Amino acid sequence: MVHALRRAGSYLERGGTLISIRPHRTWRPSIAIVAGRRRLTVATLLNTAFEVNLDAAESALERVVDEGSFALAGVRSARYRIYLARPSQMRTYLELINPPRPRFPRGGRARLDAMWRSAPRGASIEVTESLIVTALRRR
């Protein structure tokens, strides 16, 4: 990834900004059922296989800053929410995420199905993903 960051930096003008968006290290994607102002948490998704990729991404960002190619312009946490109309859309949504994709904890899928059956009309499924956004400025 260091090579990719250097390459991207070579296309930027001096002072240009490179943005890195990656999953948050500790906040996992969560699933909830939302109806009106009511929000019922269903499960927190698991993705233990992705830890190695996160470590590599963070160390690559640190390395290009330490080398002097980039200066750290800022780091922020952000949340991305998507709303699904029914549980069958969950599989499609999870398949769109680059591998390794998150999975439900044991019993999480059954809990979603049971809570969905008892949800009021007009309810939706909310998937919340927590992200870290890092801005690097080319020197």
Image: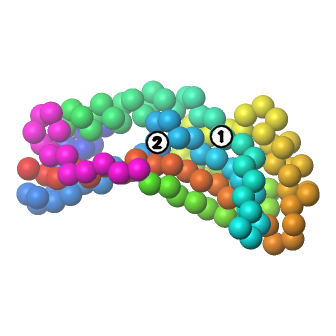
Residue numbers of the magenta segment: 65-77
Q: What label sits on residue 24 in the rendered view?
A: 2
In the image, taking residue 113 as reference, residue 84 lies left or right, namely: left
Residue 106 horizontal/vertical position (percent): 78, 31
For this view, does 98 lie left or right of residue 11? right
- In the rendered image, the residue lying farthest to the front is 37
Q: Does 46 sit above or below residue 77?
A: above
Residue 130 higher or lower than 51, as above or below: below
Q: Amino acid at mark 2?
A: His
Give x and y (percent) for residue 5: 24, 44
Q: Is residue 82 above or below residue 3?
A: below
Mark 1 element type: loop
> Residue at point 17% right, 38% down?
65
Q: Is residue 121 visible?
A: yes
Question: Is the stretch drawn in magenta largely helix, strand or loop?
Answer: strand
Q: CA distance from mark 2 to mark 1?
A: 13 Å
Let me know if residue 99 appears in the view: no
Q: Earlier in the sequence, mark 2 or mark 1?
A: 2
Residue 73: say if magenta: yes
Q: Position of residue 61 (x, y in %)?
A: 27, 38
**Can residue 104 be found in the magenta stretch?**
no
Counting other residues with Cα less than 10 Å from the Cα at mark 1, is it few (<14), some (14-19), or many (20 or more)? many
- The amino acid pointed to by label 1 is Leu
Regarding mark 2 in the picture, which secondary structure is present there?
loop
Which residue is under mark 1? 45
Q: Quadrant of the N terminus?
A: top left
User: In the image, residue 136 lies at what x, y percent?
Assistant: 22, 50
Residue at left 87%, top 71%? Answer: 121
Q: Nearer the viewer, residue 25 or 20?
A: 25
